[in-house]
Image: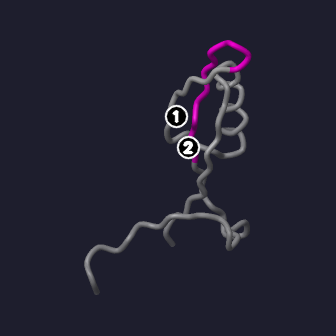
Amino acid sequence: MLQQWQYMTQIVEARRLQEELDELGYAGWELITAHWEEYSYGGRTQQQARCILKRPLEEQTAKPDTYSWEPAALGRG
């Protein structure tokens, strides 16, 4: 059977990034990429990371509204 993946995006403030990634990693999530962004709040410039994460999709947790990916077959049969 092919591996299916569940994906999630998460926005995390820079000061909490390591703590948040540790918690997500414990829950089985793997960081794919993080894009740094700046935003202003209260007259100060803040940093945040927009993260994309994935984890294996288990058969019993698969729901119709869950996004999953499978490799496409090459060519036409």
Regarding mark 1 in the picture, which secondary structure is present there? strand
Identify the amino acid type marked 2. Ile
Indicate the position of residue 48 as horizontal and vertical percent values.
Answer: 61, 26
Residue receiving disc 1: 34
Picture layout, residue 61 above or below residue 9? below
Q: Residue at x 60, y 64 (%)?
A: 67
Q: Residue furthest front?
A: 43
Indicate the position of residue 41 as horizontal and vertical percent values.
Answer: 70, 20
Picture layout, residue 44 above or below residue 52? above
> Is 21 left or right of 42, judged from the image as shown?
left
Q: Residue at x 71, y 26 (%)?
A: 19
Asked if residue 49 lies in the magenta stretch, the reply is yes
In the foreground, 6 or 59 = 6
Asked if residue 63 lies in the magenta stretch, the reply is no
Residue stretch in magenta? 41-53
Q: Quadrant of residue 68?
A: bottom right
Is there a contact, CB below 8 Å, between mark 2 and mark 1? yes
What distance separates the C-alpha of mark 2 from that of mark 1? 6 Å
Instruction: Decide: few, some or many residues near mark 2? Use Cα within 10 Å; few <14, some 14-19, many ≥20.
Output: some
In the foreground, 41 or 5 = 41
Indicate the position of residue 47 as horizontal and vertical percent values.
Answer: 60, 21
Q: Quadrant of residue 10?
A: top right
Q: Residue furthest left?
A: 75
Identify the amino acid type marked 1. Ala
Q: Residue at x 56, y 23 (%)?
A: 38
Picture layout, residue 57 above or below residue 52? below
Regarding mark 2 in the picture, which secondary structure is present there? strand
Q: Residue at x 27, y 83 (%)?
A: 76
Q: Residue furthest top?
A: 44
> Is 13 left or right of 37, judged from the image as shown?
right
Residue receiving disc 2: 52
